[in-house]
Amino acid sequence: MNNDIDIKVGAIEALNGECKDSYREAIIKACDNMKEFLLAKNAAYGNSALNPQNMLTSISVRDRLLVRMEDKLNRMVKGHEYASDDTLLDFAGYVLLLKASEILELK
């Protein structure tokens, strides 16, 4: 009887290990994809999020990013999303840009 239990416990542990590895891989893939997306988008926009031209306003980089994040949250809450947009991905990008601005000590 103990053999059956040991086999079942071993099988469960093996499955848990596979799940942990698949979650780990999924997190790595999501982070890698986000990094590539953010670098490409930042380059396409000429680093305007972290180095704005301040043509119409002179609000801080932090406040500018928070406004963009609020716009994305508003879209998610109200369910208004453009067909080609990924609002959640954009929101996550702004969170990372905010962290990058803190690292760079931008105000």
Image (cartoon, rainbow, N blue to C red):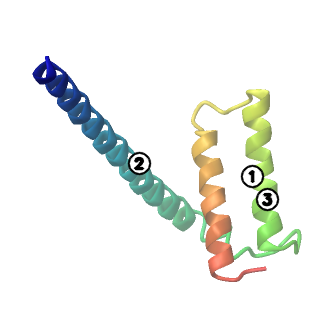
Residues under numbered marks 2 and 1 in contact, where contact means CB atoms less than 8 Å apart: no
| 2 or 3: mark nearer the eye | 2
Q: Which residue is mark 2?
A: 27
Amino acid type indicated by mark 2: Ile
| 2 or 1: mark nearer the eye | 2
Residue 76, position as x, y percentages in the image: 72, 34
> Which residue sits at x=87%, y=71%?
59
Instruction: Work out whether 52 lies above or below 1.
Output: below
Q: Which residue is mark 1?
A: 69
Local SS, label 1: helix
Disc 1 packing (10 Å; few <14; some 14–19; many ≥20): many
Farthest residue, direction front = 1
Quadrant for the C terminus, please: bottom right
Disc 3 packing (10 Å; few <14; some 14–19; many ≥20): some
Quadrant for the N terminus, please: top left
Farthest residue, direction left = 3
Farthest residue, direction bottom = 105
Residue 80 in which image quadrant: top right
Q: Earlier in the sequence, mark 2 or mark 3?
A: 2
> Which residue sits at x=22%, y=28%?
9
Q: CA distance from mark 2 to mark 3?
A: 25 Å
In screen coordinates, is 60 left or right of 36? right
